[in-house]
Each structure stands twice: as C-alpha cells, then as structure tokens.
Amino acid sequence: MVKIRLKRLGAKKQPFYRIVVMDSRSKRDGKAIDELGYYNPLLEGENFKVDVEGAKRWLKNGAQPTDTVKNILSKAGVYN
C-alpha cells in the first residue's frame, strides 16, 4: 500500500519534514517514490508548501495520507 507521509530531516531539536509518497512498509526516512512538498513546524504562518496537482494525482491513484499530512493537504486546498 502506498502512503503519503512525512520524512524527517533537520538537526536535533530542529525538525524539518518533507511530504513524500512511500511504500507503507518502508522506514520513516527510507527511499521515497515521489516528493510533494515540505513542512516546517518551527515557522510561524506559512510553514508548508505542497504540490497540489501531484497530491491530487496520488490520492486519485489510491495513496492514503497519514493524519498529519491530511491536515496539511486540507489547508493547502487539495480536498476543496
């Protein structure tokens, strides 16, 4: 099963995440199939960027987003 989830990057206590499409059995920081954007929880205001067309395409093909990614995608306007 393919999932849309976060891949952690950044230093200790400086998290930075990429929104990626991965096989559900792969490790959190393993190889990604596709990269859709990023999420930086330390920034105020606009702290994410998402490829809306790519996200819609993967969701249409059956990819399941995690809860956190689902919230980010809804803020980006993927579900509108």
Image (cartoon, rainbow, N blue to C red):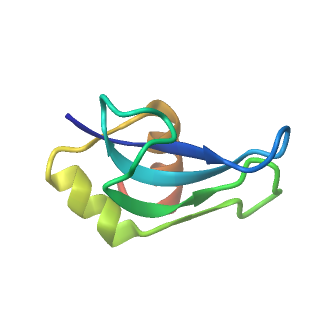
Q: Most extreme residue toward the top, as rendered? A: 25
Front in this rendered view, residue 39 or 26: 26
Q: Residue at x 58, y 59 (%)?
A: 38
Q: In what quadrant of the picture does the C terminus appear?
A: bottom left
Q: Residue 62: horizontal and vertical position, in percent?
A: 16, 44
Counting the numbered discs, the total is 0
Q: Residue 51: horizontal and vertical position, in percent?
A: 42, 69
Left or right: 34 with respect to 62?
right
Q: Residue at x 83, y 39 (%)?
A: 12
Q: In what quadrant of the picture does the N terminus appear?
A: top left
Q: Is residue 30 above or below residue 78?
A: above
Q: Is residue 35 above or below residue 3?
A: below
Q: Most extreme residue toward the left, as rendered? A: 61
Q: Residue 6: horizontal and vertical position, in percent?
A: 51, 43
Left or right: 46 with respect to 70?
right
Q: Is residue 80 above or below residue 51?
A: above
Front in this rendered view, residue 57 or 10: 10
Front in this rendered view, residue 31 or 79: 31
Q: Residue at x 80, y 47 (%)?
A: 11
